[in-house]
Every structure is written in structure tokens, then in C-alpha cells.
Amino acid sequence: MIHVLFVCLGNICRSPMAEAIFAQQVTHAGLDQKISWDSAGTANYHPGKKPDHRTLQVLTAHGIETAHRARQITDQDFERFELMLAMDQSNFNDLQRRAEALRREGYALKARIEKMGTYEPQQPVVRDVPDPYYGDLKDFEAVYQMLEPACAELLQQLQART
Ligand code: 4NP
């Protein structure tokens, strides 16, 4: 089993969208016994909340549902997930810093921390998935358009490993 965690700041816009897209792709590929998924935020701004209504609107428009509730990342996540995918550089730096601190405390960490943009196909530079929170629906759709092919590429690479 490979455990994948999608991470953004608030866990209401980008990472729950990535999680829901990936969940549908994994399930469709019949790999839900081999790959598991979740999402979390580096901040604790919206614990227990449903994803932002614009994330839900974009997902619904693409035929995807989610029951995710926002949560903050925990120390245990670093032991449980083989792969942590940060939406932007700031999320990535936060995860790296926390992983370093945990290693210094003697935790045996499983997690490989990467940026989601690494999986964008045919994209020579690794881009941030931009924070759409202060934007409008167009920005959420743009996030979807980045995440959908990146999730598909991620799944393909994981499939090669399972
Ligand atoms: P997310 O977007 O990190 O993609 O979930 C944000 C959600 C909430 C806030 C910032 C970004 N906020 O400042 O409350």
C-alpha cells in the first residue's frame, strides 16, 4: 500500500481538490487496494470544514464528489505517508522544516516530500499550484486544469512502482 498526502495551506481549496481528482482516478484504475489518499493543511484555519464552495463547484462540474473535511497536518502524518505533495513552495518549505525538526527528535520518517508541480506533464519548470482563495471561480478552474493531468501522471508513476 502506498499512502499519498496532498498538502496546501488551508486544506479547503487546492489539496482537497487534488485529493478528490486523484481518488477518482485511482478508483477508476481499480487501484484503491494499493494506493490510499488524504489531504491536510499546514495551517489550522478551517478545521472540520467542507472544501471551499468554489472547489466543490469546479469538482461537481467535472463529475467529481468529495466528503473531505479540513484538518491540519500532524506529526504522525510524516510517519504514515510515503509521499507528501506540497501545492506550492511555501507549503513545501513548511513540510521540510517540520520533517527536519522531527528527524532531530528521532522520528523515523517515511515521507518523501515533493512539489505537486513536479508531476505536471510537459512542463519544463516546476510550477506552484497558485492559491486561489482570494481569486474567483476562474482561478479554481485553472487549479483544476493543473491538477488533473498532474494527478494522472502521479498515478502512472506510482502504478509503475506497485
Ligand atoms: P488552500 O487555500 O491552501 O488551497 O486551502 C487557502 C485557504 C484559506 C486561506 C488561505 C489559502 N486562508 O487564509 O484562510
Image: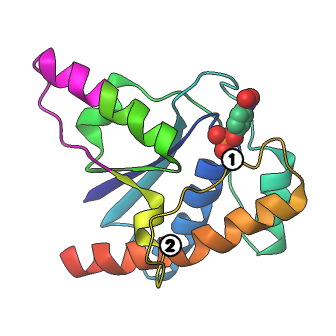
What is the image's colouring?
rainbow
The magenta stretch is 98-113
Q: Quick one: SS at disc 2?
A: helix
The image position of residue 134, as x and y in percent, is 83, 41
Amino acid residing under circle 1: Asp
Relative vertical location of residue 50 with respect to residue 117 in this rendering, above or below: above
**Residue 35 image position (x, y, % from top left):** 34, 64
Return the residue at label 2: 150
Q: Are there few (<14), some (14-19), or many (20+) residues within 10 Å of tag 2?
A: many
Residue at disc 1, CB closer than 8 Å to ligand 1: yes
Q: Is residue 162 visible?
A: no
Between residues 55 and 27, which one lies in front from this camera angle? 55
Measured along the vertical axis of the image, is residue 60 above or below residue 123? Answer: above
Determine the residue positioned at 52% across, 38% down: 40
Residue 152 painted magenta: no
Q: Nearer the viewer, mark 1 or mark 2?
A: 1
Q: Residues within 10 Å of mark 1 (few under 14, many from 20)?
A: some
Residue 112 within the magenta-colored segment of the rendering: yes
Is residue 10 found left or right of 4 in the rendered image?
A: right
Which quadrant would the N terminus be assigned to in this image? bottom left
Give the CA separation, mark 1 to mark 2: 16 Å
| Of the pair 22 and 94, the residue shown nearer to us | 94
Residue type at the position of mark 2: Ala
Q: Is residue 158 left or right of residue 126?
A: left
Q: Which residue is mark 1?
A: 131
Which quarter of the figure has residue 148? bottom right
Q: Which residue sits at x=23%, y=81%? A: 160
Visible residue check, residue 116: yes
Q: Residue furthest right?
A: 136
Residue 52 at x, y percent in the picture: 80, 44
Residue 61 x %, y %: 84, 72
